[in-house]
Image (cartoon, rainbow, N blue to C red):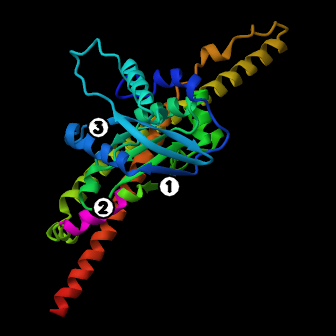
Amino acid sequence: IASRSNPGADFTTDMASTGGTLDSPVKQIQIEGLVVLKIIKHYQEEGQGSEVVQGVLLGLVVDDRLEITNCFPFPQHTEDDADFDEVQYQMEMMRSLRHVNIDHLHVGWYQSTYYGSFVSRALLDSQFSYQHAIEESVVLIYDPIKTAQGSLSLKAYRLTPKLMEICKEKDFTPEGLKKANIGFEHMFEEVPIVIKNSHLISVLMWELEDKSTVADKHELLNLSSSNHLEKSLQLLMDRVDDMSQDIVKYNTYSRNLSKQQQQKHQYLQRRQQENAQRQSRGEPPLPEEDITKMFKPPQPPPRMDTLLIAGQINNYCQNVKEFTSQNLGKLFMAEALQGHN
């Protein structure tokens, strides 16, 4: 892991020789309940507000099912820890797990998110590094805020084959993306998750549920939703502003390109007319000139960031839709209860 913003930069290069790739794609993810608890505990201990926590996923591939059986976090360190080697730390951790007969194969990574804000260039680069080296790699996105409201929010994503090809070619120009026919809806694919526990853990969960207090369950009927909805809409408006700025940049590029094409066309017409006049006078034509040097095309703005912004906007809209639909159900139920009383 080269850095916390790009956890797949260097480590996956070393893992490519040990993990290898298989032909079968991942159709389902089976994750142990202990792994889920470790991810939640990691955020509770080190995550504060919008701070992102990340870690490594370990497991194995069985047919088209990816089984995640263990994980460990990336250590928190400051700028003073310049000598800390994260790649060496991970190799030591996996070596130690192998010595105690625990699954140690690298199968992906996990990351927390703040109000669903995870569609970014850093996540794209990291997942591409993982998936390029280990084909079955996935990224788990854990939303602690939605989980705190009563429903576990844990989703698994992979890059689509189209996006993998574009990232390999590194052609993020408007023409390249148009040729690949890719939009924000074709960037990530969600893989269904199944949480699996042993029979002993299931029995323990039943006992704990019987001993739990009933008062905590009433939080699910809490009608206050202004804070969560307000924050989600604020983040959505920020990304819409970013999208509008990118649209302005692209429109400026389109106008400059069209203006240059007109100038180039006018220059060729004038040159053709002048050559015709020179030929009528018996003079030799003008020497050939390199048009591309005279009219250098403007640099097109990269469109990958715009696609990521569109994907994040779509994610915010889906979160707002899910949240409002749940709260509307609560409000209708409260209205019916109030009318009944």
| Label number found at residue 202 | none
Query: Is 129 on the left or on the right of 4, as rendered?
Result: right
Q: Secondary structure at mark 2?
A: helix
Task: Determine the residue positioned at 24% across, 62% down.
Answer: 208
Q: Position of residue 51 (x, y in %)?
A: 24, 37
* Mark 1 Cα-neighbour bin, 10 Å: few <14, some 14–19, many ≥20: few
Q: Secondary structure at mark 3?
A: loop
Query: Is 249 on the left or on the right of 15, as rendered?
Result: left
Task: Determine the residue positioned at 57% across, 36% down.
Answer: 174
Q: CA distance from mark 1 to mark 3?
A: 23 Å
Q: Earlier in the sequence, mark 2 or mark 3?
A: 3
Q: Compared with residue 294, is residue 184 higher up or lower down, i.e. above or below?
A: below
Which stretch appears magenta? 201-212
Which one is in front, 122 or 246? Answer: 122
Q: CA distance from mark 2 to mark 3?
A: 29 Å
| Label number found at residue 205 | 2
Query: Is 182 on the left or on the right of 103, as rendered?
Result: right
Q: Secondary structure at mark 1?
A: loop
| Identity, as a three-letter code, of the amino acid under mark 2 | Met
Q: Position of residue 50 (x, y in %)?
A: 24, 41
| Identity, as a three-letter code, of the amino acid under mark 3 | Val
| Label number found at residue 52 | 3
Q: Say which quadrant the C terminus sits in.
A: bottom left
Q: Are marks 2 and 3 in contact (CB under 8 Å)?
A: no
Task: Determine the residue positioned at 23% across, 87% down.
Answer: 336
Q: Compared with residue 334, is residue 227 higher up or lower down, i.e. above or below?
A: above
* Mark 3 Cα-neighbour bin, 10 Å: few <14, some 14–19, many ≥20: some
Which one is in front, 259 or 315? Answer: 315
Give the quarter of the image for residue 150.
Answer: bottom left
Q: Position of residue 319 (x, y in %)?
A: 35, 58
Foreground disc of the pair 2, 1: 2
| Label number found at residue 192 | 1
